[in-house]
Image (cartoon, helix red, strand yellow):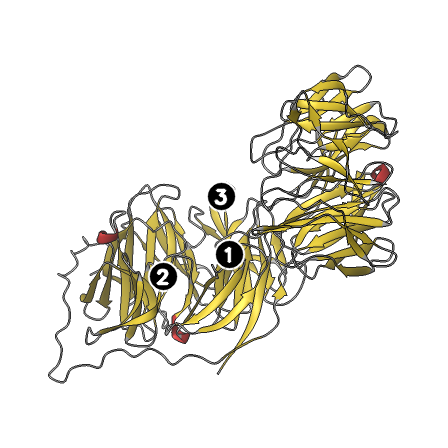
Amino acid sequence: MPLSSPSPQPPTPTLSMAPITAPPTPALPPPAALRVDQPFALGRGGLLAAAFLPEGQGVVLGWAHGLSWHTLHPTDRGLELRERGYRDLAAPLRALALHPRGIAAAAALEDGRVAVLTLADGAMQTYPVTAPGAFTCGLAWSPRGDTLAVQCIRPGQGDPIFLLDLTSGSVVSVPDSTISSSTTPWPQWTPDGQAVLLAALGEPCPRFLDRVSGEPRLTLQAAGECLSPYALAWTPGGRALAVGTAEGVTLLDGRSAAVLGQFEGAAAVFAPPPYLLPTQRLVYSTRGTRLAALGATGMGDIPTQVWEVSTRRHLADLSHEGAPPLALTFDPADEGALLLFYADGRLTRWPYAQREAAEQVLYRVAVNWPQLPLTTSADGRWVAADLTTGGAALWAVAAGDQPTLRFEAPLQHPVLSPDAEWVLLAYPPHDSNLLYRRSDGYLTLTLPGARRAPQGAAFSPDGRRLAYGDGARLRVVRLPEGVEEAVLEGFPSHQVITRVLWSADGRALAAASGVPGREEAGTLYVWQKGLEGTWWLKGESQSVRTTNPAPALAAFSPQGHWVALEVMPTYEASAIRVRVVDLIQGAVVLDLPEQALIGWVDAHTLLTHAAQNDTRLYLWDVPGGRHAPAAVTARGDEAYLPLRGVLARPNLERPQVGRRIEILALNGKRLADLAVGDDVVGLVWTGNGSHLLALTVSGALWAWPLGWE
């Protein structure tokens, strides 16, 4: 019946009767022969670290798997930050350090190597130093710039402090310098270059060790208590060491470690994951008359603070919200101002010496850090996502360090047409959805309504129609002219459309509603378009998971004859079930209690998994109701490709738990084991399995080209 009439109650679930000849039990698809080619990165990933060059000449930025370097230039509009180059790294970034004279940058990598980048010409040299699989590292140049101190930890194993001689490439270790695998390494040098810091969280306290003998030369301790090693700065003359702690900044004599004084005001000694510990956390002005401490957000907000050194008087503080600050330095032209760089790409200037002066944004570097959910085009050639810094971006599934298109905030929630020629984005300020042409970024159409979730819109398989959420309504329009074909209603008025799905023939639609951030049951409706053009309601259900982007809420069979729906009115494993509806009859033909929906393996075989106990996967022959178990159990972090009979998920084997990806056939055979190096937070198949995409905790977006035989 038309949607405008009261919706009927779904028919009593029934299991279709077996014919006289018993239907065959569904057979597992034969294991696919899979070829995996070399992966490539889409974009630079997240911005994890920054360090200012001496005298504020510029900044080096550490990305998820690359380094960029930039110089500052005065213009008529103020300071401008110009990028001089970008170099990919061979593995995920674990630490960043600058040469004392600012002529080079060094990066410690997850695979145990150290990369040294010469800023003048962009040349990069890599050196093997330690074992692969590093979770975090510390890295520091010696005062003369001829040696790098490197120390990493990995599961259950801590390194000694390695000293890399950059002239010969030789590596030696400092005696008795092995660190606990539960302590973040932070090697720092004494001004004479003869001792290196071994970090510690307790007894024995952090201490500088002689680089040759390993004997302690200076211990970070005051009043019988260990001091934190993660916020340090030597005075310009090297006679004293400032040590930041949660209680303040303690000034120690550089030889005896006697306490010389205290600066009141907590100093940050942490970095919220996945950001790296800032190398410029405590900074003296060039003349040594001022001391600044970089603030932090994310694990207890701490402001950036400035003190006068001679009197230890607190001069000013600056609170932070949102993206954490990564680096600071004194403005070389004005000691009464600080330059700061943030994880969202902002370069700012804070004239702290002026009473109640506001922080000013000087420049913004584009940070294209994607967040879930990832949206792919049906042809598998494009992927789009909202950005953690606001706005959205579109990438070609091809190697490159920049997106094809970037849309600034408040544009959000990109949705792609089958060939990605059209990109739909919500524009909340004007309560509208905007349709852009991908080839030139041209705005072609403005549609009413913007209240929807990221997956609350979808193009038809032929790209000629668009269904999108407008609050609790689903609008269907014809493209490219934008003529409205239907407005489908009936959802709870306080909910928004969270999911939209078309059948393969474009004659049926499924949509779900919910309230993002609230655990309440949402509604799922399924319509089919009649020959006369009316959209008829064919099925409905409720689920408390309609705002979760991961589970399959509905799945049309490849020929569009059936639709499978999730039913889960409460958060009880016993409440979940899968119902299969015949779209022609509008009747439930299969009801599967305590099963969760995955998708269709072929025209008549449905894939589910048990909702509790062993969560085994099952194949169901829909016409006959017979089923067969697969050899795989569901964990909840899988990306399924049912038509290929495979799934991908993070590999939980030790020691690199969650930092590899396994591709499994339904019979349990492992088809591939892919190294990532960072925690995987999301997986997506493109097209019919042409690529597997992985998003990591550091914002890296990787793609593996796949070949199927």
Q: Is disc 2 placed on a helix, strand or loop?
A: loop
Which of the numbered marks, if any, corresponds to residue 428?
Answer: 3
Q: Is residue 282 visible?
A: no
Residue holding disc 1 = 657
Which image quadrant for residue 549?
Answer: bottom left
Which of the numbered marks, if any, corresponds to residue 634?
Answer: 2
Which image quadrant for residue 316?
Answer: top right
Q: Residues within 10 Å of mark 3 (few under 14, many from 20)?
A: some
Task: Work out whether mark 2 precedes mark 3 in sequence or the reverse, and give the earlier one.
Answer: 3
Task: Work out whether mark 3 precedes mark 1 in sequence or the reverse, and give the earlier one.
Answer: 3
Coordinates of residue 142 in the picture (x, y in percent): 83, 44
Coordinates of residue 497 in the picture (x, y in percent): 37, 50
- Specify the amino acid type for callout 3: Pro
Q: Is 545 situated left or right of 122 in this image?
A: left
- Specify the amino acid type for callout 2: Ala
- Specify the amino acid type for callout 1: Val
Q: Residue furthest left?
A: 20
For the image shown, how many numbered marks are present on the structure? Answer: 3
Q: Is disc 1 placed on a helix, strand or loop?
A: loop
Mark 1 and mark 3 in contact (Cβ < 8 Å)? no
Q: Is 616 situated left or right of 672 in this image?
A: left
Q: Residues within 10 Å of mark 1 (few under 14, many from 20)?
A: some
Instruction: Report how far apart the C-alphas of labels 2 and 1 lie in the structure.
Output: 17 Å
Residue that appears at 69% across and 26% down: 221
The label nearer to you, 2 versus 3, is 2
Q: Is 60 situated left or right of 579 in this image?
A: right
Instruction: Report how far apart the C-alphas of labels 3 and 1 lie in the structure.
Output: 40 Å
Camera-side residue of 120 and 143: 143
